[in-house]
Amino acid sequence: MEFSPRCNLFLVGPMGAGKSTIGRQLAELMHRPFFDTDKAIEERTGAAISWIFELEGEPGFRLREQRIVDELTALEGVVLATGGGAILDPANRRCLAGRGFVVYLKVSIEQQLERTRRDRTRPLLQTPDPEARLLELIRQREPLYREVADLTVNTNGRSVKAVALDILRHLDTESLSRHD
């Protein structure tokens, strides 16, 4: 997909990959609005994601997520960070792949554990063995991240700014090569 000024930039990847933090940095550097699907759901419902999971279960949350993904991917010129499981829904994958440039932020299980170990707001990690859960999630989701991705960037041990600049360099190269 060609990246243009009106093109959207969507970030996908597992929890702890840095989607929200890197997304905010990219939006700032690109002078674009930033959206986060989880934050949008919380703002609309007035409830934390963990509470929605508790009350409605994962299916209820995923339905809310699908509506938000459809709405936010229909905008133009935005940077959007998705929840780690957003790619589970085929409709979400179609919206992401068809409405913008998708960057898969890849991260190791070790780095995920380090980045999420004190976070009690992640419902899928409230388990006796978070590492086993993360391994299970990545086995299930990695093929889907790859399916929608136009670019894969590893975030292991890298600063937010370094990853953001790496993505911007790629987008500049991508845009220039399409116009040669």
Image: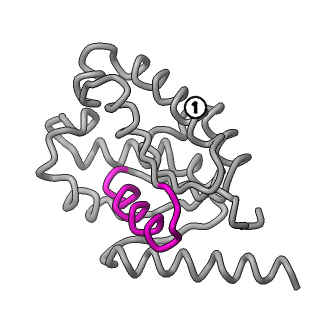
Residue 69 position in % (x across, y down): 55, 36
Query: Is 43 situated above or below 117?
Result: above
Q: Between 40 and 119, which is closer to the camera in this rendering?
A: 40
Quadrant containing the N terminus is: bottom right
- The residue carrying pointer 1 sits among few (fewer than 14), some (14 to 19) or many (20 or more) residues within 10 Å by Cα, namely some
Nearer to the camera, 14 or 35 = 35
Q: What residue type is labelled 1?
A: Asp
At 46% from the left edge and 68% from the top edge, which residue is drawn?
Answer: 26
Q: Splitting the image into 4 quarters, where does residue 16 fall?
A: bottom left
- Figure label count: 1
Q: Where is residue 5 in the image (x, y as percent from the top left)?
A: 69, 66
**In the image, residue 53 lies at what x, y percent?**
29, 23
147 in relation to 86, above or below: below
Check the image and name the residue furthest to the top: 55
The quarter holding residue 37 reads: top left
Query: Which SS class for mark 1?
Result: loop
Tell me where the magenta segment starts and ends, as one range.
Answer: 15-33
Reply above or below: 56 against 122. Answer: above
Q: Is residue 118 left or right of residue 172?
A: left
Residue drawn at (38%, 42%) of the image: 136
In the picture, the quarter occupied by the C terminus is bottom right
Q: Majority secondary structure of the magenta segment?
A: helix
The residue labelled by disc 1 is 89
- The type of colouring in the image is one colour
Q: Which residue lies furthest to the right in this view?
A: 180
Q: Residue at x 35, y 40 (%)?
A: 39
Asked whether residue 26 is drawn in magenta, I would say yes
What residue is at 50 percent from the left and 51 percent from the top? 80
In the picture provided, is 54 more to the left or to the right than 142? Answer: left
116 drawn magenta = no
